[in-house]
Amino acid sequence: MAEEKQYKLKVEDLTISFRTNQGMVRAVRGVDFDLNKGETLAIVGESGSGKSVTSKAIMGILAGNSVIDKGRIIYEDQDLTKIKEEDFHKLRGDKIGMIFQDPMSSLNPIMRLGKQITEGMIINGKHLKNRKKALYQSAQQRYYNAKSDKKQMKIDYKQAVADAKENGDTSKLETLKAEFNKNLAKQKEEIKVARKAYFEKRKEARKIVKEEWANEKAKYAEKIEKVKTELKATDDVEKQQSLKEKIEDLKEQRARYKKVTKKQAKERAIEVMGEVGIPEPEKRLRQYPFQFSGGMRQRIVIAIALTADPDLLICDEPTTALDVTIQSQILELIKRLKEERDLTVIFITHDLGVVANMADRIAVMYAGKIVEIGTVNDIFYNPKHPYTWALLSSVPDIDSADRLMAIPGTPPNMLFPPEGDAFAERNEYAMEIDFEKQPPFFKVSESHYAATWLLHEDAPEVEMPKVLKDRLAKMKSASRGVNQ
């Protein structure tokens, strides 16, 4: 496994529910995964498996009726489940970008594309404000974390007391209380110290940025004054025009130091539109979404995501609404942009065939849980979970005359999550324990883990379906032929 410092993102025991009139829907249940810098992780599963909910939690755009019951999402030493919306707004788009599955619903049909592409750059491009925040961000995060830890400490204490009473172990109550009071006193002191450091750092940041901006204005004022003096001293019409343009250019440079200007945003929009393969970008900026094909609209959505230069890109089924030939083009585009920009990517899909040539690792999700995770070779050539077998068996194969396998039944109702393996009802290899207890992750190799009781040492030996076994053998043979 990679060292923790190499992780771009780390999700730990993430559990998310939704309040409904019928009760709490347990959408995500204890999801764990990590993502290394420059890696592409594909999250695969049926509709309703929790893929998109997980990605929306990372982006901080969960629905209002959602509840993050527990877990952490660590990005750049920050727990994204605990930071304020004001700080998340800075990360969203700027650091973490997202491409949604339906480009038409992602674009405003009555707004010109130029405004839609440049809007985010102009709103978020306040350089002085962002510079100031960057200077005190670590101190601010320490203060917020300290307050959050205090809140969690109280929750943990109440739960520990409730557990002790339920188990009839009342003798522990005094010890729990004493330990809680001791830790609480320490935490209050940490909050006090962190708060003081935060306000001092914020005051210092204001002073630094104010001085930097004053120096920059003075520098440009001097340059502009020199050009104006030169302008007054000449009668040459062409030179006068050139000097006037130079003055305007200096004013534009000065404005760009402070914020993203409209001119700068337009230049960036044209550049990115060209990068994603949109012809005549200057002309296209004046057009509306309905004047574009589905594939071109998706390219526009990708362009919008890339304008802020994110280092983590989440692709939520970006090819679902497109036909097969356009799907291939969009996948190749995302793959190329990832390599050129050194992006880290989470690719969400229900189709294993889509990610075969672009993912480094694959996480298979079912009923809110990851049931198998491994490299592309692990999942495609050595799958271990019956659900993964079913998904692979249902992928269309042009060389096979065998009938595609369908997965019987439907996913469980997550208002009432099953006690055992959620896939047990649809699993022809299910054992008695599958209906009674959730399986833990069993280690297949250093990179490969699967949550199925079939990997337990006491489980009967079960082989994958013959149809899938034959298909994997053909795939291995074809792969060797390509590599030779």
Image: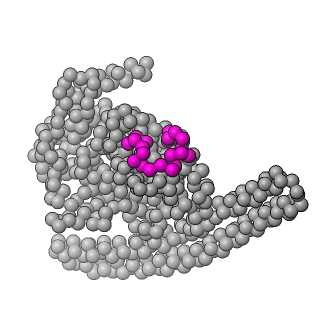
Name the residue: 36% across, 75% down. Answer: 151
**Residue 318 seen by the camera:** yes
Return the x and y of residue 96 as percentages of the image width and height: 46, 54
Q: Quadrant of residue 459?
A: top left
Residue furthest out toward the left: 432
Q: Residue at x 22, y 74 (%)?
A: 162
Q: Which residues are magenta?
A: 275-296
Question: What residue lies at 43% left-to-right and 68% top-to-bottom?
Answer: 85
| Front residue (pair 175, 442) | 442
Q: Position of residue 103 (x, y in %)?
A: 38, 48
Task: Give the quarter of the figure containing the C terminus.
Answer: top left
Please state the horizontal and vertical placement of residue 277, each as a whole percent of the image.
Answer: 50, 39
Q: Is residue 95 visible?
A: no
In this rendering, is residue 442 above or below 249? Answer: above
How far across and how far down the image is residue 407, in percent?
17, 39
Image mark count: 0
Which scheme is used to colour this image of the protein? one colour
Please say if 255 is above or below 359. Answer: below
Q: Is residue 149 above or below residue 98?
A: below
Rendered-image quadrant of the N terminus: top left
Q: Is residue 252 left or right of residue 292?
A: right
- Out of 401 and 480, give the one closest to the viewer: 401
- In the depicted structure, whether residue 361 falls above or below residue 133: above
Question: Residue 294 in magenta?
Answer: yes
Q: Is residue 302 magenta?
A: no
Image point (25%, 79%), residue name? 173
